[in-house]
Amino acid sequence: KQEVTQIPAALSVPEGENLVLNCSFTDSAIYNLQWFRQDPGKGLTSLLLIQSSQREQTSGRLNASLDKSSGRSTLYIAASQPGDSATYLCAVRGNTPLVFGKGTRLSVIA
Amino acid sequence: GAVVSQHPSRVICKSGTSVKIECRSLDFQATTMFWYRQFPKQSLMLMATSNEGSKATYEQGVEKDKFLINHASLTLSTLTVTSAHPEDSSFYICSAPKGPNQPQHFGDGTRLSIL
């Protein structure tokens, strides 16, 4: 059974800092990995999708990497802003529908 | 813009009421949709897979008679929480993939509160 773990559970940084969120998964037989953002009481916004054959994806200040063999992904956020404050969820898709981690709650302090 | 629409966004009702939640794919056809439930500060847990034209597939521990799923068209899936009780209070969210290698898109969720 696939299990997804995200570290840290919560993170608070001053505005302008670069930061890294970590995601690990137990079964490396995945089709893709997706990073989402969730604001309080809201749905999920897809940030980046990395196919199993890819090593990384970039969108603006976000960069996600994937090391399938070791079961790890990172989400790098450059020059963080208060508007980046949210919960970031990692999810993997294999033979089952998306399996989610518990997320990292990020607070960027102005 | 949004590609998956979910309605209503918030429901508050008395215990014993049945509540229907709709999930629509806006600009694509979805033969499969997924229903998730999220408790406070917890991750999203898959409840069931909704299949157009056939029965839904429920995850272990999810009562199919309690959570009725209907996927009558390629753009609409509904989840009905029957005879809801306070323990059913949660955040319900639906999802649909545009394709096998496409991002999975989510609705804005429904906050269900049973008094």
Image (tube, coloured by chain):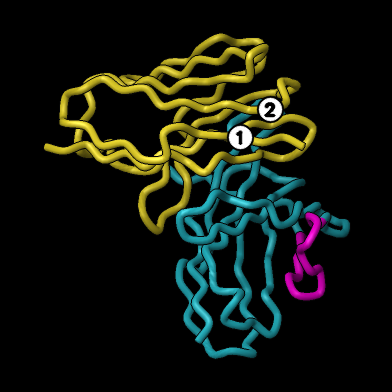
Q: Is residue A57 magenta?
A: no
Image location (x, y in percent) of residue B63:
79, 69
Q: Which residue is mark 2?
A: A26
Compare residues A18 and B4 and report the one nearer the observer: A18
Q: Residue at point 63% right, 74% down? A: B20
Q: Quadrant of the image for the N terminus of chain B? A: top left
State the mark number for residue A4.
Answer: 1
**Residue B102 spot, x, y in % from top left:** 63, 29
Q: Quadrant of residue B65?
A: bottom right
Q: Supply the letter of whichever chain is cyan.
A: B
Q: Would you say residue B72 is visible in this rendering?
A: no
Q: Is residue A97 above or below residue A31?
A: below
Q: Is residue B66 left or right of residue B101?
A: right
Residue A77 point in image, percent of width and height: 32, 23
Residue B63 lies in the magenta-colored region: yes
Label 1 environment density (alpha carbons within 10 Å; few <14, some 14–19, many ≥20): many
- A93 displayed left or right of B107: right
Please, which chain is the residue tagged with disc 2 on?
A
